[in-house]
Each structure stands twice: as structure tokens, then as C-alpha cells.
Image: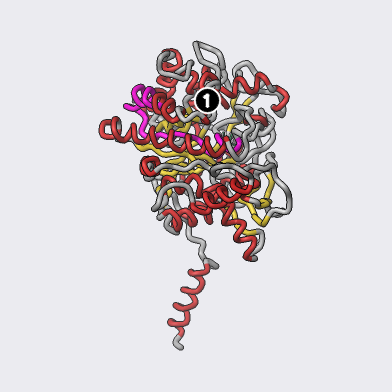
């Protein structure tokens, strides 16, 4: 064999296996980098200027004992008063977009559009205008867990009318802000709203495992679809925005590749990915057959007349199918799966699945027990979504890491770099990935963990009057990634000063 041919062949082998592949991969200029927050977690001002009570206000006021450090969202980061500082931080980071949520009870205190709270409307107007002034795209979530308590009193997401309530709320928001907002997320994490929401551990504090949670999933998916169709029909032509939904999806595979473990992993994926993806993105629409069959069988054994998982009518299937311009992906960690060796509450989603999940003990730990670093997981998840759902358009709407207090958050920096590198591979291998969003801009009220888990690129001093925000090391590193559009593992800032860069040109005009 001649030398050239040999060199050529060995080069091909090396390239295929990536052994000598030290090419620098770059995010395209139109790839959108951002950060995310949610209303309850940052705004505070829980009863200020006519805001109504939310289920989180009620739950944490009635159960202060569930919050790890006793700090609830009454004041939080006080973003209601400090939003200009928030936008200043976004300009320091140089982000392309900011994902925040609208508090439903802040603008509709009764839950219904019979009363529109103008001061609440004004707050989001100011925030949106401030963002646009500096060239930052607002990405607005309509619902991030804070249902008006008045609607919870009517059954909340268990009430079949809830989809209509949500559509009415969406109409108010689209009317008020549709001219300026081009990216909409209807619901943040239906699994969080429903499966966690009806576990009794979080708001609304109602326990209805394996029953209420499934009814909630149906209503939330319908609510999402009604808002999507509303926008499609009445606003899309005029405003040309895009509407998606954020799903909380982890990657999961067998603890070993033994068939029983891979089968268990497939069940887990069907219940945690398929249940929410299939209705919108599958060919057939509706809930996955495997989930329907499993819950129906169990329900029958348990003496229920019908499956605890409600059916979707052909009209409902049609309404939901295709109801998203993009998938908002919230991804934090991965799991290893095997058949369960324990008893779960019955009925419950856990019992219906019958699997045990764990983390690999070599994965790096964050400050939260549920969160370990497994960057390959985001790559595998993206490829799985491509294969099963035919290359959906994806926008990562949350990814983050928790620490304790302190500005030197090297573990967050490492996670950020590792995951962004994996994301570059996912893009290279065909994922239609349009953006990435860090959870979170700053430390905030981490639901029942209070402020004991810190997710911020900026540290917040919750004891100070103005809830002082200070950039962590990760803020400087993220800024650099956004500027250069590459991940440089060795880069270190010369000093820890962060300066405003975004929108400077506008000020100088
Ligand atoms: C939620 C956020 C939360 C984060 C970290 C996400 O699933 O959307 O509200 O703070 O997880 O727990």
C-alpha cells in the first residue's frame, strides 16, 4: 500500500473516532444565549400594587416549615423594584435574550380578566421596554407555577375549565405585549406543575398521586394548545412571534445494558419524556400507547372503573398535535434506570412506572441532591429527540447548577463548559438547536429549598436592603463564551470586574 493511501486511511479512522479531533467548534452568530428567571422566584412584592395571591404565596405562608432556610418569595430578589439593575446585569453578561415569567395573579388578581391590574401590566411593560432598549430579546413564560389562588379554590388544574382560564389569561398577555415579544413559552414544565404539584410536597399542597396528576397533565396540555392556537389564529400574522412550551426532560438509560434495565429505562422515558412530547410531536398525537396501556392495566387491577390517565378525544388530539413552534428544553441531569426493588405509594406515577432511578456515583455533585453533572446526557437526549420526534426545533430554556454562597463558583464554570461542549456536538450531529439559557441570572427562591441552593451567575445578598447582586466567576466566563462563541476551557479573567457591553452603542448615540 502506498504511503499516501495509508495516511489517508488512518486519518479517516482517527476522524471518525474523534481521537485527533481538536477542531474548535463555534456557536453561530444567530445562536441565542440567555439567562432565565421566574416571577415567584425573583419578583417579591407579593401583595404590592394590587397583586392577587398565588398558590405559592398561600402554600409557603401556611407551611413555612417546608422551606429549607425559611426564606419564601415575599421579597425574594425584589426584582419588582430592582428590574433596572436586572437589565443592567444582562447588559454586563451581553446576553441575546432574557427569559422571565409573568405572574398571572399580578396582572389578573381574580384569575379572570374581569379585573386587570394596571400596575402589574405596567411592571412588565417597563421590563420589556428596558430590555428592548438595549437589544435584548424578551422570552416570556406565561405560567411558571404561580396559579392565582382564586382559581386553585375552584380546583386549579384539575378543573376542566382551567384550559379556558389559561386561554383568557393568554389573550390579555398577547394583547398587551404581543407587539414587542417574539418568543413565548406557554407553560413551564407540565411535569412540575402536575406530578410534583400533586405530590403534596409543593404548592398547591394537594396530594392526589396517580389520579389528580394525570388529570392535571391532560388539562395543562390542553391549556397550552389553546394558547398556541389562539396566537396562531389572532396574533401570528400581525406579530410574527413563535410559541413553544418548556418541558423538563432528563436523559435516562439502563444502569447496565441488560435487557431488563434497558426496558425499565424505556418505560421511564415514556412516562417522563413521551407523556409530554408525544401529544405535540409524535406522528399519531395523543399520549404514548405504552403509558396508556400500563396505567389502564394497573387501574383495572386497582378496581378503578376507567384508567386513571384520562383519554384525549380525537378533537383534543388534533388540537394539541403540532401545537408548538419549538421545544423549550429544560435539562439538568440524567438518570440510570433499573426495575424497582421497592414499593411505591399506590396509586402513583412511580408505582405505574415501577422503576428505580439513580445517579452514577462518579458524576460530580452540585449542592442539590437531585442534581449531578452528566454532560453526555444532553447529547444523548438531543439525539433521542431527533430520532423519535423527527428533528424538532429546540431552544434550551433552562440548564443550571447549584452551589452554596460564594463568588468563586468553579463547579458551575466546569458544568457550563462541559454542557456547552456537549451541545456543540449535538448541533454538529444534526440537532436543530437555536439557543441556550442558563438557570439562573441570579440566586433566587428555589421553591422549598428557599435560598439554601444558589443557582445564580450573580450572587444575591438577601440580607441587604437592595438585594445586592454581585457577579460570580461563572458570570465572567459566560460573558466570554457569548462574546467569542466558543468554549475555552483554560480561560481565566484578569480581574473579577464585569462591565456593561451590551447596548453601549445605543447609549452613545
Ligand atoms: C424550574 C426552576 C427551578 C429549577 C432548579 C426548574 O425545573 O423550572 O423554577 O428553579 O428547576 O430547581
342 sits to left or right of 280 = right
Identify the residue at the far left of this view.
237
- Give the image location of residue 271, x and y in percent: 55, 48
Q: Is residue 301 above or below residue 105?
A: below
Q: Is residue 203 above or below residue 215?
A: above
On the question of residue 437 being in view, the answer is no
Q: Residues within 10 Å of mark 1 (few under 14, many from 20)?
A: many
Q: Residue at x 50, y 74 (%)?
A: 13
- Span of residues in magenta: 170-196
- Residue 286 location in percent, x, y? 44, 47
- The residue positioned 49% from the left and 18% from the top of the image is 106
The quadrant where residue 139 appears: top left
| Viewer-nearest residue: 149 or 432 | 149
Quadrant occupied by the C terminus: top left
- Please state which of residues 402 and 503 is positioned toward the viewer in this rendering: 402
Q: Is residue 141 magenta?
A: no
What SS does tag 1 mark? Answer: loop
Q: Quadrant of residue 494?
A: top right
Q: Which residue is mark 1?
A: 147
Is 179 magenta? The answer is yes
From the top left corner, tell me how far across and down residue 357 is, in percent: 66, 51
Along the line of sight, which residue is nearer the eye, 466 or 159? 159
Amino acid at each position: 500500500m502506498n504511503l499516501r493511501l495509508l495516511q489517508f486511511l488512518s486519518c479517516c479512522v482517527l476522524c471518525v473516532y474523534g481521537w485527533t479531533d481538536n477542531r474548535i467548534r463555534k456557536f453561530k452568530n444567530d445562536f441565542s444565549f440567555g439567562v432565565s428567571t421566574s416571577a415567584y422566584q425573583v419578583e417579591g412584592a407579593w401583595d404590592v400594587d394590587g397583586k392577587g395571591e398565588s398558590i405559592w404565596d398561600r402554600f409557603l405562608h401556611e407551611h413555612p416549615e417546608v422551606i429549607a432556610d425559611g426564606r419564601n418569595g415575599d421579597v425574594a430578589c425584589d426584582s419588582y423594584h430592582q428590574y433596572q439593575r436586572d437589565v443592567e446585569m444582562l447588559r454586563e453578561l451581553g446576553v441575546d435574550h432574557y427569559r422571565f415569567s409573568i405572574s398571572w395573579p399580578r396582572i389578573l388578581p381574580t384569575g379572570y380578566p374581569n379585573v386587570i391590574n394596571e400596575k402589574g401590566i405596567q411592571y412588565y411593560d417597563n421590563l420589556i421596554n428596558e430590555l428592548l432598549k438595549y437589544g435584548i430579546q424578551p422570552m416570556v413564560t406565561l405560567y411558571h407555577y404561580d396559579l392565582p389562588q382564586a382559581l386553585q379554590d375552584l380546583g386549579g388544574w384539575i378543573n376542566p375549565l382551567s384550559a379556558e382560564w389559561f386561554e383568557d389569561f393568554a389573550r390579555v398577555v398577547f394583547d398587551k405585549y404581543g407587539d414587542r415579544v417574539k418568543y413565548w413559552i406557554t407553560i413551564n414544565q407540565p411535569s412540575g406543575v402536575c406530578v410534583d404539584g400533586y405530590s403534596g410536597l409543593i404548592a398547591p399542597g394537594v396530594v392526589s398521586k396517580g389520579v389528580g396528576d394525570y388529570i392535571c397533565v391532560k388539562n395543562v396540555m390542553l391549556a397550552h394548545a389553546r394558547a398556541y392556537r389562539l396566537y396562531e389564529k389572532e396574533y401570528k400574522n400581525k406579530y410574527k412571534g413563535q410559541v413553544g412550551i418548556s418541558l423538563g426532560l432528563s436523559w435516562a438509560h439502563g444502569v447496565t445494558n441488560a435487557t431488563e434495565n434497558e426496558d425499565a429505562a424505556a418505560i421511564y422515558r415514556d412516562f417522563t419524556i413521551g407523556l409530554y412530547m408525544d401529544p405535540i410531536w409524535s406522528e399519531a398525537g395523543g399520549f404514548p400507547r405504552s403509558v396508556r396501556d400500563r396505567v389502564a392495566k394497573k387501574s383495572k387491577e386497582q378496581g378503578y372503573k376507567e384508567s386513571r390517565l384520562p383519554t384525549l378525544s380525537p378533537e383534543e388530539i388534533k388540537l394539541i398535535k403540532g401545537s408548538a413552534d419549538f421545544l423549550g428544553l429544560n435539562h439538568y441531569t440524567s438518570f440510570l434506570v433499573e426495575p424497582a426493588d421497592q414499593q411505591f405509594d399506590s396509586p402513583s406515577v412511580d408505582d405505574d412506572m415501577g422503576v428505580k432511578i439513580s445517579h452514577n456515583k462518579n458524576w460530580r455533585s452540585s449542592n442539590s441532591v437531585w442534581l449531578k453533572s452528566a454532560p453526555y446526557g444532553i447529547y444523548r437526549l438531543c439525539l433521542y429527540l431527533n430520532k423519535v420526534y423527527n428533528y424538532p426545533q429546540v431552544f434550551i430554556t433552562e440548564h443550571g447548577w447549584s452551589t452554596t454562597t460564594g463568588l468563586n463558583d468553579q463547579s458551575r464554570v466546569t458544568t457550563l463548559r462541559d454542557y456547552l461542549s456537549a451541545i456543540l456536538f449535538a448541533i454538529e450531529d444534526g440537532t436543530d438547536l437555536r439557543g441556550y439559557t442558563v438557570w439562573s441570572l441570579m440566586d433566587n427562591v428555589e421553591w422549598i429549598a428557599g435560598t439554601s441552593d444558589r443557582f445564580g451567575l450573580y450572587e444575591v445578598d438577601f440580607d441587604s436592603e437592595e438585594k445586592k447582586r454581585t457577579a460570580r466567576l461563572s458570570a465572567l466566563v459566560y460573558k466570554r463564551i457569548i462574546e467569542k462563541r466558543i468554549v475555552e476551557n483554560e480561560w481565566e479573567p484578569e480581574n473579577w470586574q464585569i462591565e456593561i457591553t451590551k447596548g453601549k452603542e445605543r447609549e452613545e448615540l
